[in-house]
Amino acid sequence: MRASSSTGFLLAVAGGLCLSVSAGAAETADCGAKYKEVAPDAIKLPYREFDQSEAGWRKLGNCFAEASVLLGRYVRKQESELRGVRWHLAQTLAMSGDNERAAEEALKSLNPDEARQHPSFSWNTYALATVAFLRKDRAAFDAQYEAHRAATAKHPENQINLDVLTGLARCFDKPYEEAYGSCRNARP
């Protein structure tokens, strides 16, 4: 009798496993649909709401693969936005004459994934040329300037940033505020 009881138990367990696998496949499809429903609104939420409330990634429940995709997207979005803020912090520090701190913040604005995310927009060359200007490293500035100049045909904003770098080149020994402003607009 024990043998048949344990056989019955094993069949029940095996049946449960099959049911779990079937439920897992259905849950995967449900998770995909749930992600499509949740992600567009969740990605726009402010940090605290995205991370700590049921309106953000937690709304995906046990859909862990989809939650990790959404969290990864949110991190990349935040990093991108933070890079922009760091750049403007660097500029204001440079405008006020704090070149070393400005250079440190400008380096934090670099996009480590630029080649994949924005292959035609050459942000890093612009930022690195500016850092070289702030540190008065003419050789490094010239190398980044030339790399940026070569990228101008790929994206219209590269030309706008080249105009800034041209002003920095014209007034390399001047303060950033002057080189960024009046030297940029001066004709050679």
Image: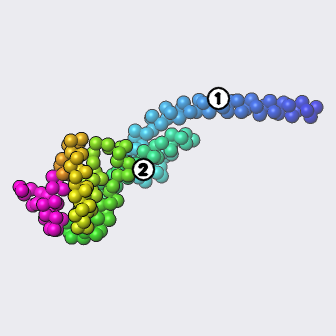
Q: Nearer the viewer, residue 62 or 79?
A: 79
* Quadrant including the C terminus: bottom left
Q: Is the Cβ of the residue at disc 1 closer than 8 Å to that at disc 2?
A: no
Q: Give the spatial CA distance, label 1 vs label 2.
A: 33 Å
Asked which quadrant contains residue 91, the reply is bottom left
Q: Examine the structure image and report whether residue 182 is included in the region drawn in magenta.
A: yes
Q: Is residue 177 visible?
A: no
Q: Nearer the viewer, residue 102 or 52?
A: 102
Residue where numbered disc 2 is placed: 75
Asked which quadrant contains residue 116, the reply is top left
Q: How many marks?
A: 2
Category of crowding for the residue at label 1, using alpha-carbon neighbours closer than 10 angstroms: few (below 14), some (14–19), many (at least 20): few
Q: Is residue 169 above or below residue 81?
A: below
Which segment did they paint magenta? Answer: 163-188
Percent from the top left, x then y, of residue 90? 27, 62
Mark 1 or mark 2: name the one nearer the start of the chain.
Answer: 1
Q: Amino acid at mark 1?
A: Ser
Q: Amino acid at mark 2?
A: Val
- Is residue 176 rendered to the left or right of residue 187? right
Residue at the spot 80% in from the left edge and 30% down from the top edge = 11
Q: Examine the structure image and report whether residue 168 is included in the region drawn in magenta.
A: yes
* Residue 107 numbered mark, or none: none
Q: Is residue 163 visible?
A: yes
Residue at the spot 16% in from the left edge and 64% down from the top edge = 172
Percent from the top left, x then y, of residue 36? 45, 34
Residue where numbered disc 1 is placed: 22
Category of crowding for the residue at label 2, using alpha-carbon neighbours closer than 10 angstroms: few (below 14), some (14–19), many (at least 20): some
- Is residue 147 rendered to the left or right of residue 27? left
Residue at the spot 28% in from the left edge and 42% down from the top edge = 120
Which residue appears farthest toward the right when viewing the image? 1
